[in-house]
Image (cartoon, helix red, strand yellow):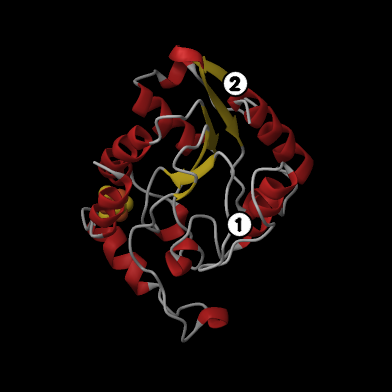
């Protein structure tokens, strides 16, 4: 499957009834975005198809990428992440807005689950269902050398993708595990508002992991 076919098939996916309902139910429920058109479908990854570095998140935010259709775009997670990608020299501009000409350099962004879940918590079944799209999407990124998981759930989804045991590769911020074939698996706290506004994840902490991932990827 090529990337355009993947995107077409993915955006038609309705495998998870709870998420299909939720991604449409939340439309217009936030005052700041009332009256706006929402994407309200599965959110495909965004970035460089020749990426050497893949950032792997949890799931779309109800009023973030579920609204804009681009990962980490339109909410607090993206307001934290995109300026740091730019600061690390990995993008053409420090912000992301749907329809802009933002380019990521050697980087691709995606997530373990591609439809917005209630409370940002996908169930085990929903994670399992969406792993089929992870297999296709990561399989298309043939140049990828470094996978940076944002949060524990994302790390566990990547471990499952690579057929590795959770107990051997525990989650902690700054974790670094070599993979076969000269590839690397890294982990960071997720860039969610709960982490960035409480100081659990600072700009400096994330930039340090991002620059390490960049160096390992040879970018
Ligand atoms: S979360 Fe994934 S598997 Fe479930 S409906 Fe959305 S795209 Fe399909």
Mark number displayed over residue 78: 1
Say which of 101 and 177 sits in front.
101
How many neighbours does mark 1 have within 10 angstroms: few (below 14), some (14-19), or many (20 or more)?
A: many
Instruction: Provide the residue designation for mark 2.
Output: 176
Say which of 115 and 49 sits in front.
49
Q: Is mark 1 within 8 Å of ligand 1?
A: no
Q: Residue furthest right?
A: 204
User: In this picture, is 70 found above or below 170?
Assistant: below
Disc 1 secondary structure class = helix
Disc 2 secondary structure class = strand
Residue 169 in picture, x, y percent from top left: 50, 19
Q: Is mark 2 within 8 Å of ligand 1?
A: no
Say which of 170 and 4 sits in front.
4
Q: Quadrant of residue 131?
A: top left
Residue 156 in picture, x, y percent from top left: 43, 31
Query: Left or right of 141: which side holds 149?
Result: right
Which quarter of the image is occupied by the C terminus? top right
Residue 118 in picture, x, y percent from top left: 40, 60
**In the image, what residue occupies the spot 58% across and 48% down?**
104
**Residue 196 is at least partly visible in this image:** yes
Residue 190 in picture, x, y percent from top left: 59, 43
Q: CA distance from mark 1 to mark 2?
A: 24 Å
User: Disc 1 vs disc 2: Cβ atoms closer than 8 Å?
Assistant: no
**In the image, what residue occupies the spot 73% across and 39% down?**
207
Which quarter of the image is occupied by the N terminus? top left
User: In this picture, is 99 found above or below 219?
Assistant: below
How many neighbours does mark 2 have within 10 angstroms: few (below 14), some (14-19), or many (20 or more)?
A: some
**In the image, what residue occupies the spot 65% across and 43% down?**
90
Task: Name which of mark 1 and mark 2 comes first in the sequence.
Answer: 1
Say which of 80 and 139 sits in front.
139
Q: Quadrant of residue 186?
A: top right
Query: Left or right of 179: which side holds 19?
Result: left
């Amino acid at each position: 499957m090529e990337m355009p076919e993947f995107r077409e098939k993915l955006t038609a996916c309705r495998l998870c009834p709870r998420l299909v309902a939720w991604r449409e139910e939340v439309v217009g429920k936030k005052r700041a975005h009332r009256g706006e058109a929402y994407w309200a479908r599965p959110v495909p990854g965004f970035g460089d198809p020749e990426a050497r570095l893949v950032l792997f998140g949890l799931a779309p935010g109800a009023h973030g990428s579920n609204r804009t259709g681009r990962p980490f775009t339109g909410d607090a997670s993206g307001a934290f992440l995109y300026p740091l990608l730019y600061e690390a020299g990995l993008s053409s501009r420090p912000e992301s807005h749907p329809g802009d000409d933002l380019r990521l350099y050697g980087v691709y962004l995606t997530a373990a689950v591609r439809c917005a879940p209630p409370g940002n918590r996908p169930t085990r079944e929903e994670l399992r269902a969406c792993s089929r799209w992870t297999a296709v999407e990561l399989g298309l990124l043939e140049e990828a050398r470094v996978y940076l998981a944002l949060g524990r759930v994302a790390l566990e989804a990547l471990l499952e993708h690579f057929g590795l045991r959770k107990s051997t590769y525990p989650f902690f911020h700054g974790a670094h595990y070599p993979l076969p074939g000269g590839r690397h698996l890294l982990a960071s706290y997720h860039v969610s508002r709960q982490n960035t506004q409480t100081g659990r994840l600072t700009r400096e902490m994330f930039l340090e992991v991002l620059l390490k991932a960049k160096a390992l990827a040879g970018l």
